[in-house]
Image (cartoon, grey):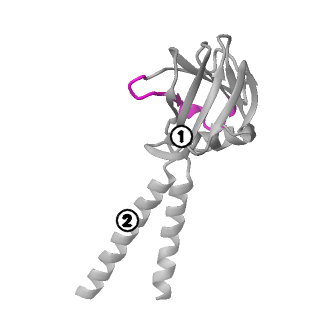
Amino acid sequence: MKKQLLYLIPVFVLMTAFILLPSRTSSLYLRIYFEEIAGDHCTLYYSTDAMDVFCLGQHQTSEIDYDRKMVEFNLDPSLDGHITGLRLDFPNTEQLLCIDSVTVSSGGVIKHQYSPCDFFADENIASLHNISGISSVPSRARVYIATSPEESYLIFSDALCRQITDSYSHYRLTKAAFCVFLLACFLLARKKIFRAE
């Protein structure tokens, strides 16, 4: 029994190293679903540790998909660990837009599904620009945002930014499941071999 346990130690060490070693990172998707919105597109600006300002060189623009009533922002894997801030720009139109859901996903898995009342809560917003008000309706899980024709945007808090950007998938759970499957197959095969003998 002791020999078998000693034999498994290097196997567990190799499995742990395989799981923890850096691997390919998947893109991060932020999707915002609207009940009511007008305009052509929304823009997500990001600041990084290399350039800690919101600028034209660091943004994603998403055309509004009116069939699905949503916008989708795709943050490249190369940004993992480097994003320091996020700013969401709405269409330059005076309107009262309505948001009904927000999701963050990576690696084909939804990491966070937010009620807009939580996502756009006061503690998650660092500052507003040309937005006259944000109204939450918890009973309907809806948020209404009043924008203006002149560059309406909001900047998310550092805490929410970290929560979003920490959602990049490194496939660790996938690798762990693969290791457990291989180990189970190995132990089952050993058991059958020894029984046969």
Q: Quadrant of residue 80?
A: top right
Q: Amino acid at mark 1?
A: Val
Residue 13 part of the magenta segment: no
At x 48% / y 56%, what residue is drawn?
Answer: 173
Q: Earlier in the sequence, mark 2 or mark 1?
A: 1
Q: Nearer the viewer, residue 17 or 52?
A: 52
At x 68% / y 30%, what residue is drawn?
Answer: 134
State whether residue 191 is above or below residue 124: below
Residue 149 shown left or right of residue 98 in the figure: right
In the rendered image, residue 46, in percent from the top left (x then y), is placed at 66, 26
Q: Quadrant of residue 59?
A: top right
Mark 2 — residue?
182
Question: Which quarter shows the C terminus?
Answer: bottom left
Q: Which residues are magenta?
A: 66-86
In the rendered image, residue 141, in percent from the top left (x then y), is placed at 56, 42
Between the C-alphas of marks 2 and 1, the distance is 31 Å
State whether residue 141 is above or below residue 181: above
Badge 1 density bin: few <14, some 14–19, many ≥20, Cα 10 Å? many
The label shown at residue 104 is 1
**Element type at marker 1?**
strand
At x 23% / y 86%, what residue is drawn?
Answer: 196
In the rendered image, residue 12, in percent from the top left (x then y), is placed at 51, 68
**Element type at marker 2?**
helix
